[in-house]
Image: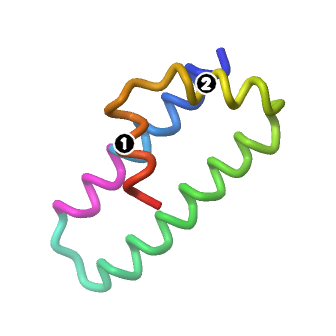
Amino acid sequence: MSTDKLVAILEKQRLIGGMIKKQNMPHNARIESVVLKQHDVELQNYIATHASHEIATSLEQLSLEDAQWASSNK
């Protein structure tokens, strides 16, 4: 369950990030900055509501692709 929630968060963040990069909007950098802050808060909330062993297990169970994406977007 905990891993599924983390994967869902990462998938949503990847989808939203891709949509933002593909759109040509004024103030795109500002919008991207706000979205990244929201993503950080989502992950902080996940970390705050799970025990360290649950987080470790979830991270170990991430696919290589998810782990690489998460680490490259920080």
Q: Quadrant of residue 41?
A: bottom right
How does the figure colour the protein chain or chains?
Answer: rainbow
Q: Quadrant of the N terminus?
A: top right
Answer whether residue 21 is magenta in the image. Answer: yes
Left or right, 33 with respect to 39, comes to left
For the residue labelled by badge 2, is the local secondary structure a helix, a strand or a loop?
helix
Give, as a single range, the part of the protein colored magenta. Answer: 15-22
Left or right, 35 with respect to 65, comes to right
Left or right, 39 with respect to 44, comes to left
Picture coordinates of residue 66, whole percent (x, y): 39, 34
* Residue nearest the observer in this picture, 17 or 56: 56
* Residue nearest the observer in this picture, 69 or 43: 69
What amino acid is labelled 2 in the image? Ser
Residue that mark 2 sits on: 58
Q: Count neighbours of disc 2 (C-alpha within 10 A) and say few if under 14, some if 14 to 19, many if 20 or more.
A: some
Picture coordinates of residue 2, whole percent (x, y): 67, 21
Residue at the spot x=47%, y=64% of the render?
Answer: 35
Q: Count neighbours of disc 1 (C-alpha within 10 A) and say few if under 14, some if 14 to 19, many if 20 or more.
A: few
Residues at marks 2 and 1, CA–CA distance in whole angstroms = 14 Å
Q: Quadrant of residue 4?
A: top right
Work out whether mark 2 precedes mark 1 in sequence or the reverse, and give the earlier one.
2
Residue that mark 1 sits on: 68
Answer whether residue 1 is magenta in the image. Answer: no
Are the residues at dot 2 and dot 1 in contact (C-beta closer than 8 Å)? no
Residue at the spot x=40%, y=81% of the render?
Answer: 30
